[in-house]
């Protein structure tokens, strides 16, 4: 079976990170806004509130200036009150507008993002197995978590911030020009220097933060891999080895993050000193202009406030640029997955009973195959055999010979490189994939139960099954007694948070599942690990019930199964080296089968 390398290199990691803002990346980024379309009215309302809140904010410096001026205007106290009230009104409006902006944008982004997540998940479960073999699980799950969160931030916060900053910049510059062109030009003379330096700084910070992100992703991969294989870690007493591995990667991330913080800190210092230095210069020059009677005192106050606003928005823009880049990168990665080719399953079929039943004749004709991840290694060479409906065939042979691969191909998990496989004389490539798989039942070597009750786990074989059918399946699978021995019976929780079932019990649940599914073709991948004889007997009995009247292919490890089948295929190095019944094959003392038999006898 497919085995995932422990700590295999993550070439895909390179793709992580931010996306340079180009016309093309921006155009692709906008595609994600297709998810906003169903909520466009709310989005437009949110935009209106965004415009209103940004503009009302810009009235603030103007009114503060007027408040200062009103004290000189013939001591008209009334006027002062009026302006002050106007200021309060502006702030109140600003608050109200901001509330609605956040509220509407949240509605849009939460819904849109839930839809992206739903589509991603639906894509994930429909992608072919080969997709998963090329990627690490942690990397795939980060699409649905981190990347989507970044897009959500972009939709709700970054977009609004960007708009606010740009408005502040444009409206602010118009206002200060209107107040005093001379002072504006003086102020703006300091800006190009600030911007040039900020760009240099910004680039360095961006590079470091990307590196930190990548390194953090690496640490997450270690956590996930280790937790998934926690039994292996413990059995090898490698806890401290893993802690060390994690710490090394974490240390690297911390080091990079701290270097990044050093530059970020310096950047902030630079902005503060530059900005306040600029403001002091502006005030100094402004006060001389006031003294000369060129501008009013209130205008100077407005001017200084606008300058602070403009300065802050220029400072914020650098940060926002990084966020937009990150969001574009995330969008690209999400779109990449959404555009992956999914398996041609039939999405309309609801119940198993609606699916036509095959007869169950299987034929492999000169099948050749190598795994997409290892195209250079020929796993199967020239496999040809037939199984008539209702017949039982066992595949035996050394580990790694290709037995599991042979049955995976029947499920169309992969495409063949040569030859063909037919079911009822029809090439499986021309069959509806859902119909093909619905007709095949699998009892795997390692039975994985989903978190939930035993009832739900059995019903997984046919979700529409009735309670009576579930109980009957449990009976036939020799599982009823042990299920009933639990205080909660069929409601007993299994899986991650439930009780742990023994290997034999899990297998019987899997058999009950398959009995419910009632497929025409059955695949049994026997557990290699020996069960105790009592459990073995119960499982074997259940298997016999299950195999009755079904075309069955068994990957056999136990003599008990092998003796009963109609035909045995001995596989070695991706080829069928012997074929015949148990009696025929055991008569050839030099044969591979006889050899395997001897080995089993010696071991048992
Ligand atoms: N997903 C995969 N990607 C690449 N190579 C694989 C994959 N799965 C199996 N292989 C390789 O294909 C060969 C056949 O493996 P397969 O699992 O079919 O053997 P097997 O006969 O079922 O072995 P076992 O009895 O140990 O399960 C092995 O060399 C194995 O390393």
Image (cartoon, rainbow, N blue to C red):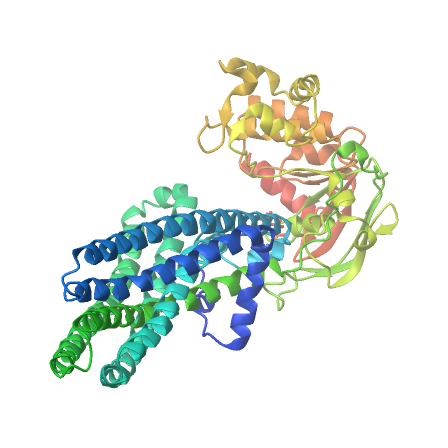
Give the number of callouts: 0
Q: On the rendered image, what quadrant is the C terminus found in?
A: top right
User: Which one is nearer the viewer's eye here, 34 or 60?
Assistant: 60
Task: Give percent across and percent down for residue 563.
Answer: 72, 34
Task: Give percent across and percent down for residue 514.
Answer: 69, 31
* 249 versus 273 height, above or below: above
- The residue positioned 55% from the left and 65% from the top of the image is 30
Residue 365 in the figure: left or right of residue 370: right
- The residue positioned 44% from the left and 30% from the top of the image is 497
Quick check: can you spot residue 477? Answer: yes
Q: Quadrant of ligand 1?
A: bottom right
* 199 versus 569 height, above or below: below
Task: Give percent across and percent down for residue 217.
Answer: 38, 59
**Residue that sits furthest to the right in the current view:** 425
User: Which one is nearer the viewer's eye here, 288 or 481?
Assistant: 288
Quick check: can you spot residue 263? Answer: no
Task: Give percent across and percent down for residue 553.
Answer: 73, 41
User: Which one is nearer the viewer's eye here, 406 or 149?
Assistant: 149
* 423 versus 246 height, above or below: above
Residue 508 in the figure: left or right of residue 284: right
User: Which one is nearer the viewer's eye here, 484 or 85?
Assistant: 85
Can you tell which quarter of the image residue 531 is in? top right
């Amino acid at each position: 079976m497919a085995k995932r390398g422990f700590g295999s290199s993550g070439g895909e990691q390179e793709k992580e990170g931010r996306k340079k803002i180009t016309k093309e990346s921006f155009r692709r980024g906008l595609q994600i806004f297709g998810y906003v379309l169903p909520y466009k009215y709310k989005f437009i309302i949110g935009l209106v509130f965004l415009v209103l809140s940004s503009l009302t904010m810009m009235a603030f410096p103007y009114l503060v200036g007027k408040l200062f001026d009103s004290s000189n205007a013939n001591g008209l106290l009334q006027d002062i009150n009026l302006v002050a009230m106007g200021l309060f009104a502006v702030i109140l409006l600003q608050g109200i507008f901001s509330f609605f902006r956040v509220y509407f944008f949240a509605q849009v982004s939460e819904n849109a993002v839930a839809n992206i997540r739903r589509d991603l998940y639906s894509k994930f479960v429909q992608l072919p197995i080969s997709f998963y073999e090329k990627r690490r699980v942690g990397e795939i799950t980060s699409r649905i978590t981190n990347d989507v969160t970044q897009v959500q931030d972009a939709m709700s916060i970054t977009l609004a911030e960007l708009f606010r900053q740009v408005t502040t910049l444009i409206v602010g510059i118009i206002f200060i020009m209107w107040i005093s062109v001379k002072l504006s030009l003086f102020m703006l003379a300091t800006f190009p220097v600030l911007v040039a330096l900020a760009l240099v700084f910004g680039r360095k910070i961006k590079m470091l933060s990307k590196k930190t992100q990548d390194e953090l992703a690496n640490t997450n991969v270690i956590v996930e891999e280790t937790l998934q294989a926690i039994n292996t870690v413990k059995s090898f007493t490698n806890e401290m080895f893993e802690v060390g591995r994690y710490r090394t990667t974490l240390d690297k991330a911390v080091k990079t993050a701290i270097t990044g913080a050093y530059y970020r800190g310096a950047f902030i210092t630079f902005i503060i000193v530059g900005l306040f230095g600029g403001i002091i210069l502006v005030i100094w020059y402004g006060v001389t202009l006031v003294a000369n009677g060129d501008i009013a005192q209130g205008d100077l106050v407005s001017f200084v406030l606008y300058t602070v606003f403009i300065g802050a928005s220029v400072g914020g823009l650098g940060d926002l640029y990084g966020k937009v880049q990150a969001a574009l990168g995330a969008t690209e990665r999400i779109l990449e997955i959404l555009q992956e080719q999914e398996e041609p399953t039939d999405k309309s079929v609801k119940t198993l009973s609606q699916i036509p039943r095959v007869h169950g004749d299987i034929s492999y004709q000169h099948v050749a195959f190598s795994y997409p991840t290892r195209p250079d290694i020929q796993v199967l060479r020239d496999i040809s055999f037939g199984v008539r409906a209702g017949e039982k065939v066992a595949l035996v042979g050394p580990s790694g010979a290709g037995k599991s691969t042979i049955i995976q191909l029947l499920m169309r998990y992969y495409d063949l490189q040569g030859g063909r496989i037919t079911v009822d004389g029809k090439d499986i490539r021309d069959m509806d994939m859902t119909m093909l798989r619905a007709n095949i039942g699998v009892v795997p070597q390692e039975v994985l139960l989903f978190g939930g009750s035993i009832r739900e786990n059995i019903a997984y074989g046919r979700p529409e099954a009735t309670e009576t059918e579930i109980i009957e399946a449990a009976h036939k699978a020799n599982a009823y007694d042990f299920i009933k021995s639990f205080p909660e019976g069929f409601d007993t929780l299994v899986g991650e948070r439930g009780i742990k079932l023994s290997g034999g019990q899990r297998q019987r649940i899997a058999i009950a599942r398959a009995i419910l599914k009632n497929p025409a073709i059955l695949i049994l991948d026997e557990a290699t690990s020996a069960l105790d004889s009592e459990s073995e007997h119960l499982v074997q009995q259940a298997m016999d019930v299950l195999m009755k009247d079904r075309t069955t292919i068994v990957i056999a490890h136990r003599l008990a199964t092998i003796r009963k089948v109609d035909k045995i295929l001995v596989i070695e190095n991706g080829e069928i080296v012997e074929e015949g019944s148990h009696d025929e094959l055991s008569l050839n003392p030099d044969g591979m089968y006889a050899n395997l038999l001897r080995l089993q006898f010696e071991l048992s």
